[in-house]
Amino acid sequence: MKIGIINAGNIGLNLAVGWIRHGHDIMLSKDTHPEELRERTRALALGRGLSETELSRFRYGSLTDAAQFGDIVVMAVYFPRLEPVLEELHKDGVTFSGKIVIDTMNPLNVDASFNHFHDLKFMEQTSVTERLQLEFPEAILFKAFNNVPAGLLDIKKWSDGSYPSIIFIGGKSVEDAAQVRTLIETSGFKPQFAGHDLSDSRILEKLGILVHRLADNEYGGDTGIAIGVVKSSSE
Ligand SMILES: NC(=O)c1ccc[n+]([C@@H]2O[C@H](COP(=O)([O-])OP(=O)(O)OC[C@H]3O[C@@H](n4cnc5c(N)ncnc54)[C@H](OP(=O)(O)O)[C@@H]3O)[C@@H](O)[C@H]2O)c1
């Protein structure tokens, strides 16, 4: 698959590194500090055991280049930067027409002291996914990966046999959902499809609040946790 990553930061880059070794063609872009992207990619990729040959397969471009390159596009933009990024894409005529767009984002805003907080006002009214669908009516939107910390998107971190379920929502057709499912499976994770109604992406964004509460109350503030779905083997 041809995949464009709009903002290869923590999450975008970790996803890309997982996917490149499965033969996908990937174009990376970075919103802030694009000049550091190649070096950051090298450090993360080699740290996760990629070879020089695998590393050399990454392509690099602008946010718009990545939007145009991918049949599947990952939107992994830092939420406080969403508006300027949307502006740039629109200015360059990006429509995502007929493309699968996977939104990984959470509505986490930041205050002057760089403390992050869930933007409850925004969350009462909409979700990032719905916002993107409004901005790009011809895109085939999905929500996925927003509740797993970027550093834990390496399946090797789950070698004890437990692993998070990637719960995803969206897409207009069964065929589109199947492609997203396959992409999740190729990273080694377990896809759990929660339905086609994009407004349900609000549930996945709110789940982030629960994860933060659990981190605070059960794990001493350690946010290296994720949600798994288990099914009882008994009736
Ligand atoms: N990170 C995760 O574990 C994770 C997991 C699930 C979903 N998401 C969602 O995915 C989207 C992208 O998240 P991301 O974390 O991958 O974004 P990112 O681009 O890596 O964003 C982090 C942003 O904060 C800046 N930044 C980082 N540390 C900073 C510091 N100490 N002081 C000032 N600025 C700093 C980065 O700047 P530079 O990169 O330019 O240095 C960048 O602008 C977000 O909507 C997020 O909610 C993230």
Image (cartoon, rainbow, N blue to C red):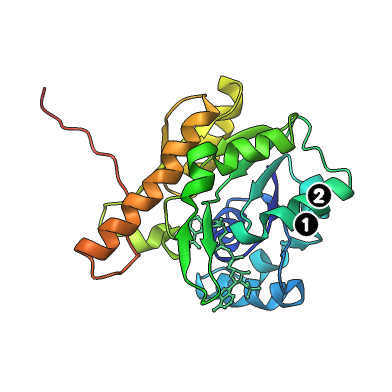
Q: Which residue is rendered at x = 83% and y = 46% of the image?
A: 90
State the separation of the CA atoms marked 1 and 2: 7 Å
For the view shown, which residue lies furthest in the left direction? 234
Percent position (x, y) of residue 203? 42, 37
Residue 225 versus residue 19: which sits nearer the camera? 225
Three-letter code for the amino acid on which mark 2 is drawn: Leu
Disc 1, disc 2: CB below 8 Å?
yes
| Ligand 1 in which quarter | bottom right
Could you tell me which quadrant the C terminus lies in?
Answer: top left
Q: Which mark is residue 53?
A: none
- Dot 1 falls on a residue whose secondary structure is helix
Which residue is at a point 20% across and 62% down the rendered structure image? 218
Q: Foreground residue, 161 or 72? A: 72
Q: Is residue 32 above or below residue 177?
A: below
Q: Residues within 10 Å of mark 2 (few under 14, many from 20)?
A: some
Q: Quadrant of the N terminus?
A: top right
Q: Give residue 162's position: percent from left, percent from top.
A: 27, 52
Would you identify the image quadrant in which residue 52 lies?
bottom right
According to the picture, the residue beneath numbered tag 2 turns out to be: 89
Q: Would residue 146 be found to the left or right of residue 70 on screen?
A: left
The type of residue carrying mark 1 is Leu
Classify 208 as above or below 196.
Answer: below
